[in-house]
Amino acid sequence: MTIKVLLADDQALVRGALAAMLGLEPDIEVVAQVGTGDDVGPAAARTTPDVALLDVQMPGIDGLAAAAALRESLPSCRVVVLTTFGRPGYLARAMRAGAAGFVVKDSPPEQLVEAVRRVHAGLRVVDPALAAESLSTGASPLTERERDVLVAAADGATVADIAKRLHLSEGTVRNHLSSAIGKTDSRTRAEAVRIADGFGWL
């Protein structure tokens, strides 16, 4: 039985290398390759893959949002999230989005191939070092709204800009920023963004 795989990565060289590597396996066929999160859904609808390998950071919706959307539109497709950065928060968010696997890109090639086979067989695959770090770090302390506000603040937007973008009052934005700064044990919102991003909470 051939395992049909969809690949989503915004770096064409990485995407091509992964496709070539997986194509060498007799039981795996890459049926679609896309470079943005927005293209995952339409490509999956056309090709009905068994397994989707999704990069976390892509243009359009990110890989975690694409994983959640796939769970709704094509429940039979198992998702493996790929990331350059092994951040504990990404792992927790990937699992909440319904991913069956989480693999760091610098893993040995045979590990990725095995991950495809294992998730297709109904198992979960998680990078062991990242799983251990995730357990020691714990869940994100940020609420969804605090996370949204920090994401909006990441490009240096003013409180007024953030309020307009998120349809909140400026006072509410200040409260969320203040809470996020406290929870990340930082001194400024820029530092809070950097710390939260480093843990993969954003």
Image (cartoon, grey):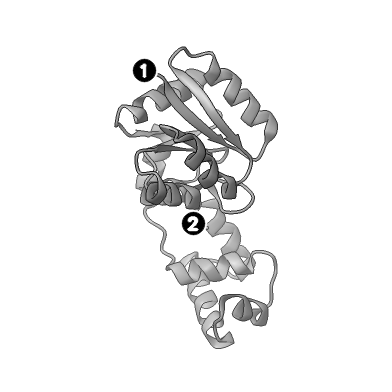
Query: Above or below — where is 153 with respect to 28?
Result: below
Mark 2, other Cα within 10 Å: few <14 / some 14–19 / many ≥20: many
> Mark 1 falls on what kind of element?
loop
x, y percent for residue 52: 47, 36
Which residue is most to the left?
A: 122
C-alpha separation, residue under disc 1 versus residue under disc 2:
38 Å
Q: Nearer the viewer, residue 139 or 96?
A: 96
Query: Above or below — where is 194 with respect to 36?
Result: below
Which residue is most to the front?
A: 46
Residue located beneath label 2 in the image: 201
Label 1 sits on what residue type?
Met
Q: Is residue 96 left or right of residue 198?
A: left
User: What residue is drawn where x is 43% and y is 45%?
Assistant: 91
Q: Is residue 194 left or right of residue 130?
A: right
Residue located beneath label 1 in the image: 1
x, y percent for residue 140: 42, 59
User: What residue is drawn where x is 45% and y is 27%?
Assistant: 4
**Quadrant into which the N terminus falls:** top left
